[in-house]
Image: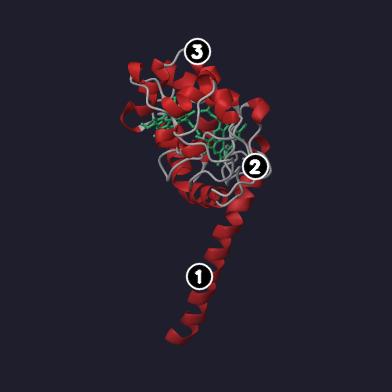
Amino acid sequence: MNVPLLPLAGLFLAVSVSAQAADATAVYSKGGANPAAMACATCHGAEGEGMASAGFPRLAGLSAEYMRKQLADFASGARANPIMQPIAAALSADEADAVTTMLAGKPHPQPDRVDRTALADGPGQTLALRGAWDRNIPECVACHGPSGTGVGDAFPPLAGQSAQYLASQLTAWRQGTRKNDPNDLMGHIARSLTEDEVKAVSVYFAGLTDTGAAK
Ligand code: HEC
Ligand code: HEC
């Protein structure tokens, strides 16, 4: 009896592995098993590049772990958004795992390296590279990395996201509709910025686009 089971077990493994791989692309371009989990590509672009004019963020090259956390936060309501909340709630954990792993591996902008030693020009770049320590605002690159390209699973990239999306997130923290950051790190910062600073720093990071530079 044991003999015929072995090839079956192998077959089962092969099927489940390929089903997982197939899922990511299918979920991304056609949607999840639950119809409320709408196709991501419609809004986030064919290659996860986002849609700047509509304020839909780029997902290509973001950490899978960061994206899974955001999906869980949308599902729980810790991050409120009328579009993403029902989508995140309808995605299964397997679908979320597969699609975020696939997106993390996609090509993303590689801007020139700008770190804290660079000369800061204008209010957006000054905030990004120097902060405003008289108001306890640390420089953004301290956490989001040189050029704001992101650090590890906790600190997402800002470089190359649209100014509209970046400003919408800072505003969400100011208004308390996004409150999913560890220790209120971003909430504190966003509430300390003026509206002009929100605009300036968002425009600054949106302008750090791909120059083909190595990271
Ligand atoms: C109808 C448009 C739409 C569809 C479809 C959609 N999204 Fe989104 N997504 C958005 C918007 C708008 C936001 C920004 C929400 C906000 O302002 O908080 C967003 C944000 C996100 C974020 C957070 C990104 C960040 O930088 O924090 C993730 C992750 C995400 N979406 C994943 C997905 C996945 C996975 C799918 C497919 C299952 C999907 N989205 C389908 C519109 C959409
Ligand atoms: C002390 C560390 C820290 C500093 C300094 C910091 N951030 Fe953040 N930021 C975070 C963390 C952590 C997150 C992700 C929160 C989460 O888990 O959703 C984040 C997320 C963001 C997001 C949302 C990105 C997305 O994909 O949705 C924006 C926009 C942002 N930060 C802008 C800024 C700006 C602008 C500055 C400088 C004025 C700044 N941050 C400084 C820690 C920091």
Residue type highlighted by circle 1: Leu
Q: Looking at the image, is 58 positioned above or below residue 124?
A: below
Q: Is residue 189 left or right of residue 20?
A: left
Q: Which mark is residue 195?
A: 3
Residue, disc 1: 13
Asked which quadrant contains residue 211, the reply is: top right
Q: Is residue 170 left or right of residue 60?
A: left
Residue 167 placed where, x, y %? 53, 22
Q: Is residue 191 visible?
A: yes
Q: Are marks 1 and 2 in contact (CB under 8 Å)?
A: no
Calculate the distance from the C-alpha at mark 1 to the C-alpha at mark 3.
54 Å
Question: Counting other residues with Cα less than 10 Å from the Cα at mark 3, is it few (<14), some (14-19), or many (20 or more)?
Answer: some
Q: How is the image coloured?
A: secondary structure
Q: Is residue 176 visible?
A: no
Of mark 1 and mark 2, the one earlier in the sequence is 1
Residue, disc 2: 211
Q: Secondary structure at mark 1?
A: helix
* Closer to the eye: label 2 or 3: 2
Of mark 1 and mark 3, the one earlier in the sequence is 1
Residue 57 placed where, x, y %? 58, 33
